[in-house]
Amino acid sequence: MFEEADRTYLFIECFANLFRYNLRRLDSPVTLRDEIENINNYIALLKVRFADRIHFVQEVDESVVGIPVPCMVLQPLIENAFIHGISEMESGGTISLRVRQDSDNYIVEVEDNGVGMSQEKIRQILGDDAEDNRPSGSAGHTTGIGTRNVMQRLRNFFDYDQVMDIQSSKPGGTKVVISIPKICVQRKKECIHASNPGG
């Protein structure tokens, strides 16, 4: 900062914020706002490294961002969108994050315009008979948390099974949709408040 190296200062600040966030316990409740702030740090680092090769679009309903979610559920989805979706594209790679609600649900979408995935892979991630629930371990991942792991933690957190859907075409991109009934969110808020009455 003193040397007016603004790009380096931004990189270090974002990396420090990301590192601190990654050290949280995965079962710790956070808000969706916390998750989005963490994503913005992650995207800032990607843009420092890959410049114009990545475009990030964010459409967020601010009335939704206070809801509780498990820690580290969005970054693995953004990572997958980049690493498996658009990282091989020379230019024009876009990742979109949308947060909205309808009459019954809170909805989070992570979409890329990359290479897509097979229906077999989608079934493996979403199906109860998937071969395992281990972290994906793909090269380049910073969290080591796979999409199926995120889905299972969301299921456990909200006690609701139909939390995730994946839509994809090859080529054409992939959209991961998290949908949580408002009644489940309200029940979770009450549970958190009961366990931390002074918080």
Image (spheres, grey):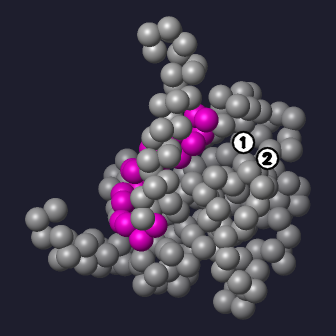
Three-letter amino acid code of the residue under disc 2: Ile
Q: Residue at x 57, y 70 (%)?
A: 150
Alpha-carbon neighbours of circle 2 within 10 Å: few (<14), some, or many (≥20)? many
Residue 133 vs 91, above or below: the answer is below
Q: Is residue 47 above or below residue 172?
A: above
Q: Is residue 12 left or right of residue 175?
A: left
Q: Residue 135 at what x, y percent from top left?
A: 67, 70
Q: Residue at x 80, y 45 (%)?
A: 87
Which percent across, then down, holds residue 136?
A: 72, 68
Callout 1 crowding tier (Cα within 10 Å): few <14, some 14–19, many ≥20: many
**The C terminus is located in which quarter?**
bottom left
Q: Is residue 61 visible?
A: no
Q: CA distance from mark 1 to mark 2?
A: 7 Å
Q: Which residue is mark 2?
A: 86
**Magenta region, mostly helix, strand or loop?**
helix
Task: Please determine whether, in this image, residue 84 is positioned above or below residue 186.
Answer: above
The magenta stretch spans residue 38: yes
Under mark 1, the amino acid is: Thr
Task: Indicate whether residue 157 is drawn in magenta.
Answer: no
Pick whichever of labels 1 and 2 is earlier in the sequence.
2
Q: Horizontal and vertical percent for residue 30?
A: 36, 60
Residue at horizontal 64 percent and vertical 62 percent from the top: 144
Q: Which region shows up in magenta?
A: 26-45
**Is residue 94 among what the camera can see?**
yes
In this rendering, the label closer to the viewer, 1 or 2: 2
In the picture of the structure, the residue carrying the numbered disc 1 is: 94
Q: Are marks 1 and 2 in contact (CB under 8 Å)?
A: yes
49 vs 98: above or below: above
- Compared across the picture, whether 45 is left or right of 131 comes to left
> Looking at the image, which is closer to me, 93 or 10?
10
